[in-house]
Image (tube, helix red, strand yellow):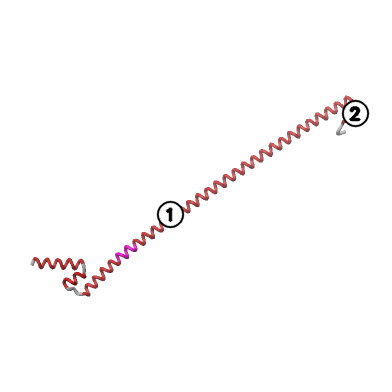
Amino acid sequence: MYSKLKRVLVVCSLTVASPVLAQSVHGASPVTTSGVTEWVRDQRIESRSSAERARLERERAERERQARLERERQARLERERQARLERERQARVERERIERERARIERERLARMERERAERERQARVERERRERAECARYGHARCDTYSRHG
């Protein structure tokens, strides 16, 4: 009795573990076996395809992550480039402003120097004319006509 029970237990465990072995041990019908076999095969295929789908999903997610990182990197580079261009533009505008200011100061300095030179010449001319008039008054009008530049 004990050995028979043991044998039934072995058959049951084999049946559960492998339908092919169960068929050979106790002669189960091939229809049942093929149904179980197909179910097992379907489970393996489903498991494989599920694993494949999961792998493909992970790969897709990784590609999307890499693409997002690349877009972010490109956007950061573009922002940095725009900021650099703006800094360069502002520096150029500032240099041009400083150069215009220097040119204006130089023009004003030259104009002031020219006015001062003209004023010195005018003062010298006035002084010269005053001396000539004084000399003319001392020597008489006849001589003033000879030496006078303007008269």
**Hey, which residue is sitting farthest top in the picture?**
138
Vertical placement of residue 28 versus 79, above or below: below
For mark 2, does the 10 Å Cα neighbourhood hold few (<14), some (14 to 19), or many (20 or more) residues? few
Left or right of 61 in this view: 87: right
Q: Is residue 54 within the magenta segment?
A: no
Relative to 43, does residue 84 appear above or below in the rendering? above
What segment carries the magenta color?
46-53
Disc number at residue 88?
none
| Residue at horizontal 31 percent and vertical 65 percent from the top | 48
Image location of residue 121, percent across then percent down: 77, 33
Query: Judging from the image, what secondary structure is the residue with disc 2 in?
Result: helix
Label number found at residue 143? 2
Q: Residues within 10 Å of mark 1 (few under 14, many from 20)?
A: few
**Residue positioned 34% across, 63% down in the render:** 53
Q: Is residue 136 left or right of residue 116?
A: right
Quadrant of the image for the N terminus? bottom left
Residue drawn at x 73%, y 35% as measured from the top left: 115
Residue indicated by mark 1? 69
* Identity, as a three-letter code, of the amino acid under mark 2: Arg
Q: Which of marks 1 and 2 precedes in the sequence?
A: 1
Residue at the right extreme, as displayed? 142
Q: Position of residue 92 (x, y in %)?
A: 59, 45
- Report the magenta stretch's main SS: helix
Q: Secondary structure at mark 1?
A: helix
Query: Could you tell me the amino acid type at mark 1?
Result: Leu
Image quarter in which the C terminus is found? top right
Q: Position of residue 35 (x, y in %)?
A: 24, 72
Image-quadrant location for residue 37: bottom left
